[in-house]
Image: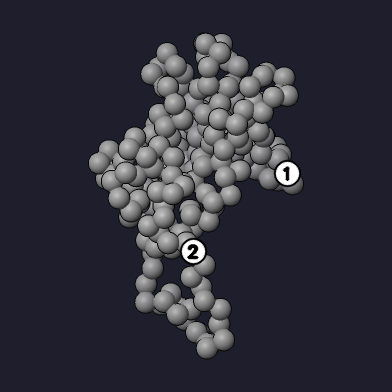
Amino acid sequence: MHFTSTILAVALSSTALASPLTHHGGRGNKSHTPDPNIFPDFNRYSDWAICKNKITKQRFPNLQAPNNDGGCVRYYRGIDITGVVTERHFFFRDGFRTACDCAAQCLENPTSCTNWVWKHTFMPGDDNMRSCTLYSSPNLPTDVTLAYNTNSSKGFALLQPGNNPQAGAPAPLTFLDAAGTVPDEFGVSGFMVQDQNGRQFC
C-alpha cells in the first residue's frame, strides 16, 4: 500500500473544508488541546501524485489539486482495494493503455464509480495485458459479509451472483500470474469521490 495516500487523502479534504472553527482545535478548544492540524502541506500534493499532466484540472475542472498538473494521490500500489458492485471492464482494445486511463474513467463517472483497479485479470479478451475495472464499492474487511438486496437496489450491475453476498477478506495483491504467486508491483488501485459541492478528489 502506498502509505501516504491515506494521509494525503485526508489532507485534501481538510484543506478544502477548513473553517475558523478548526483553526485552533474547533469548538470547545482548550489550551491543552492537541493541535488538530495533523496534515502535510497541501502544496506537496505533487510529490506523491500519479498521472500528473494526464489527470489535470483542465480536463477535470473540479479536481481538488493545488495546480493544473493535477494527478491522484489516493492510490494503493500493488494492492486491489476494489469491491464487487457496479463492475465494469475496459481493455487494451478499448483504448486503455495505462492506469491513468483507468483512473480518468472513474473520474468521468462520479455517480457510479468510487474505486478502480489496473491489473491483470486473466479474462478472455484482455490480450494478456493489464486492464481496468471500475466499481462502486470497496473491498470489505475480513469480519464483514454483506448481502445485497438487488430487488430494492439500482445501479449495481454488474454484480456477479458469486459476489453476493460479498465476503470480507484482506485486500488482495495484484499478480503477474493467474495462480497468484508472482506479485505485480505495477498493478494499482485507487479511490475517487465527488462531494456534495461537486468537488472531485482522487
Horizontal side of 18 relative to 115 (left or right) equals left
Q: Report whether residue 156 is seen.
A: no
**Which residue is outermost to the front?**
47
Instruction: Give the Cα distance between marks 1 and 2.
Output: 29 Å
Among numbered discs 1 and 2, the one appearing first in the sequence: 2
Disc 1 designates what residue? 142
Q: Residues within 10 Å of mark 2 (few under 14, many from 20)?
A: some
> Of helix, strand and loop, which one carries label 1?
loop
- Residue placed at 44% from the left, 40% from the top? 50
Horizontal side of 84 relative to 95 (left or right) equals right
Residue type indicated by callout 2: Phe
- Residue placed at 34% from the left, 35% from the top? 54
- Residue 202 position, x and y percent, is 43, 45
- Residue placed at 61% from the left, 43% from the top? 1
Examine the rendered structure and indicate whether residue 38 appears above or below residue 170: below
Q: How crowded is mark 1: few (under 14 residues within 10 Å), some or many (20 or more)?
A: few
- Residue 191 position, x and y percent, is 49, 43
